[in-house]
Image (cartoon, helix red, strand yellow):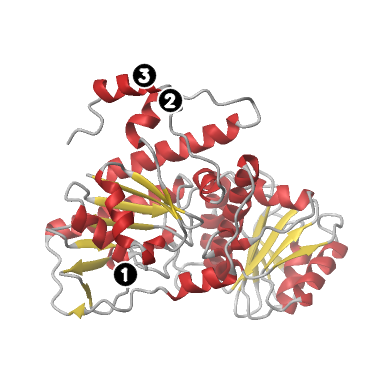
Amino acid sequence: MKQLDTRLMHPAEQICIIISRIYRAGMTTTSGGNISIMDDNGDMWITPSGVDKGSLKPSDIMLVKADGTVVGPHKPSSEYPFHRALYKIRPKLHSVIHAHPPGLVTFSVVHEVPNTNIIPQAKSVCGPVGFAAYDVPGSEGLGEKIAEEFQRNPEFKAVIMENHGVVLMGEDIADAYQRFETLELCARTIINAKTLGEPKYLTDEQIGFHDNCAAASYPHFMDVHHPSDERKIRQQICEIVRRACNQKLMCSSYGTVSMRWRGNDFLITPPGIQRWDIDLEDIVQVKDCAVEAGKRPSRSVALHQEIYRRNPHVNAVIMTQCPSLMGFNTTDAKFDVRTIPESWIFLQDVPKFPFASQYNDVEKVADAFKNRACVMLANDAIVVGCDTLLNAFDRLEVAEFSAKSLILAAPVGKLHPINDAQVEDLRVAFHVGEK
């Protein structure tokens, strides 16, 4: 998947990249949804009407000039009127995304707005979320109602559309997409949590504490070297981050990956860069408990450092938010991995630590990896640590698949887990717990 550089890339190409991400992630249909970008000169680039969203090319994207002239081989999206209305009332925002992702459509049809306090970063990424009254798709009336809702609160950059979907704005298309993906993660997390029990939300104080826990105390070093083994690690980290994004195991606004380099030195992803677009030079080297000059490591860098220091067998760590696992991570429901043999062999028991443990109880969380590969940090993240990065990713996939199976099973019937005798057979047959 190509990276998105909004500074240099043509608007038509940007739109094709983002609509492809949305379609491949199952967040829109062949005919559904539309995206636009407003140029500084007042020209709007927008997806066409009636063209397959799964195969759009830059040449398909329509141009609507400031004077209303339409340029291109198709008709512009039928929802063009509300895009035009939004740019008039929010001239500092230059992109609009409208789609029908299943999680947010669920909220639109029950006439509710997702509570973004379900995960720590969502409140700042999404901001307050509005709710616009229904009107006929593509009509001037729908544009007016959406525009009125955006006008009602100047902080709104996301609005749920009654019995329709969602519309989001951004300073650029990457900003709008990050908001879109994060809000859908919130919606799916809440839905999964409600399937399992009652969601637990964070207070504004807890979110503020999390936001203020930056890795500012690490000293910096200037003499940075990039030998071949270090460059290889950078490549592996970038590849696994993009793979996680493609698999919906990570989203734009959250996810940290690190790999041990030499001794307890390691490389780690930075904050503040959308995960889809992390590149080799963004990765941060941590050496002798110091950070390479001019860069910031993930806010969870202290936890990664402690995991490597206390667990010589761990060489890679992934922290992320997956919708099914986060359903368990935001309720009191037990994540029982005694579902199929693979789940128990790879995961055993998965403990859950209180929110903010990655800052307040680093040693205890790190020690949990002595005899397991996966832990949960309530309302925050799933953390996986293994001997290789691929094994860590594999266990993350197994954990998310297991959580999804349990959620799907909840309305079907009572769980019948593998019993103790069967677990003991697995322990012996697969040498579980042996070093």
Instruction: Look at the image and tell me whether residue 206 can be seen.
Output: yes
Residue 58 visible in the snapshot:
no
Q: CA distance from mark 1 to mark 3?
A: 45 Å
In the picture, measured across the screen, residue 291 lies left or right of residue 43, that is left
Q: Secondary structure at mark 2?
A: loop
* Residue hosting label 2: 340
Going 24% across and 34% down the picture, which residue do you hit? 433
Residue type marked 3 = Ala
Q: Residues within 10 Å of mark 3 (few under 14, many from 20)?
A: few
> Mark 2 against mark 3, which lies toward the viewer?
3
Of badges 1 and 3, the one in the foreground is 3
Please give the name of the residue rendered at 33% of the width and 30% of the height, measured from the top-left corner.
345
Alpha carbon distance from label 2 to label 3: 14 Å
x and y percent of residue 174 in the render?
Answer: 52, 65
> Quick one: 250 or 246, which is closer to the camera?
250
Instruction: Give the structural element (helix, strand or loop) at label 3.
Output: helix
> Which residue is at the front of the view, 305 or 8?
305
Distance (Cα) linking label 2 and label 1: 37 Å
Q: Residue at x 27, y 52 (%)?
A: 367
Which residue does the numbered mark 1 point to in the structure image? 297
Q: Quadrant of residue 46?
A: bottom right
Q: Nearer the viewer, mark 2 or mark 1?
A: 2
Image disc number at residue 421: 3
| SS class, disc 1 | loop
Quadrant of the frame with the C terminus: top left
Query: Within 10 angstroms of label 1, few (less than 14), some, or many (20 or more) residues?
Result: many
The residue shown at (44%, 71%) is 8
Q: Residues within 10 Å of mark 2 (few under 14, many from 20)?
A: few
| Relative to 419, residue 176 above or below | below
- Using residue 48 as the reference point, say whether residue 173 is left or right of it: left
Question: Answer yes or no: do the residues labelled 1 and 3 have beta carbons within 8 Å?
Answer: no
Give 110 or 164, whichever is nearer the viewer: 110
